[in-house]
């Protein structure tokens, strides 16, 4: 069977095929979404090994609940709703074991696969000077730390939007709050990030 490409079929079509018994279609979904789901979870739980385990849990749950997926829904929204619930369950159990809370500020840990949110801001152009590369790396670290320090509700919306590319309407459905509340949380998150990174504003513009 020929490899499945993003251009050939949508996520929703792949999911329909998987519901019909096509295992290769599910493998295609995993290839498309594993890295972003991992990065979303990593920013919530902060530990790469734990994030890897939870990613596996997410895709196991997708398989177990495949029959519940409605064809008119967006697969990514459905998948990130599952990922969010997996994170919530893990963090609740971790809190009971007296692990660090979700809101405790910690240094961001770099995942082993896929670019982190901070790395995506780095200037990859060959002609970039050593100084700009150094500043880009420092900016990336500051962005990661600033995101981790956001209040949980704001961080969740920011990550769903920035990493998952989930529409505001769907984020509202996932989180169970009005769409205007979601947009407000995103606005507050961006304001906090802008304030935290104000001294790097000019460089941030140049590195986008």
Image (cartoon, rainbow, N blue to C red):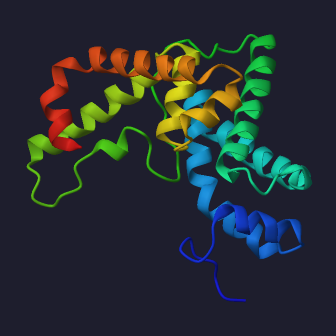
Residue occupying image coordinates x 46% and y 23%:
186
Residue occupying image coordinates x 50% and y 18%:
185
Residue in front for this viewpoint, 63 or 106: 63
Residue in front for this viewpoint, 42 or 68: 68
Residue occupying image coordinates x 56% and y 41%:
166
* 129 displayed left or right of 194: left
The quarter of the picture where the C terminus appears is top left
Q: Position of residue 161 (x, y in %)?
A: 51, 36
Q: Quadrant of residue 17?
A: bottom right
Q: Position of residue 92 (x, y in %)?
A: 78, 18
Q: Position of residue 45 (x, y in %)?
A: 63, 28
The quarter of the picture where the N terminus appears is bottom right
Q: Quadrant of residue 121?
A: top left
Residue 161 visible at all: yes
Q: Position of residue 164 (x, y in %)?
A: 55, 43
List the single residue furthest toward the bottom.
1
Residue in front for this viewpoint, 33 or 149: 33
The count of marks equals 0
* 57 displayed left or right of 49: right
Q: Quadrant of residue 156?
A: top right
Residue occupying image coordinates x 25% and y 32%:
138
Q: Is residue 57 above or below residue 71?
A: above
* 203 displayed left or right of 36: left
Residue 135 visible at all: no
Q: Is residue 97 above or below residue 204?
A: above
Residue in front for this viewpoint, 106 or 59: 59
* 17 displayed left or right of 200: right
């Amino acid at each position: 069977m020929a490899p499945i490409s993003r251009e050939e079929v949508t996520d929703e079509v792949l999911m329909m095929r998987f519901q019909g018994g096509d295992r290769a279609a599910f493998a295609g979904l995993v290839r498309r979404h594993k890295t972003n789901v991992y990065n979303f979870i990593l920013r919530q739980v902060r530990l790469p090994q734990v994030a890897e385990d939870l990613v596996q849990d997410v895709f196991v749950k997708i398989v177990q609940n495949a029959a519940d997926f409605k064809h008119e829904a967006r697969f990514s929204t459905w998948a990130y709703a599952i990922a969010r619930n997996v994170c919530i369950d893990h963090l609740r159990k971790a809190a009971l074991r007296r692990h660090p809370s979700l809101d405790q500020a910690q240094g961001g840990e770099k995942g082993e696969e896929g670019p982190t949110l901070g790395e995506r801001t780095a200037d990859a152009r060959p002609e970039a000077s050593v100084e700009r590369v150094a500043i880009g790396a420092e900016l990336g670290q500051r962005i990661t730390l600033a995101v981790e320090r956001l209040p949980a509700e704001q961080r969740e919306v920011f990550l769903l939007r920035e990493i998952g590319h989930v529409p505001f309407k769907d984020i509202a459905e996932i989180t169970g709050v009005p769409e205007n509340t979601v947009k407000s949380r995103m606005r507050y998150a961006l304001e906090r990030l802008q304030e935290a990174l104000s001294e790097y504003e000019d460089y941030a513009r140049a590195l986008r």
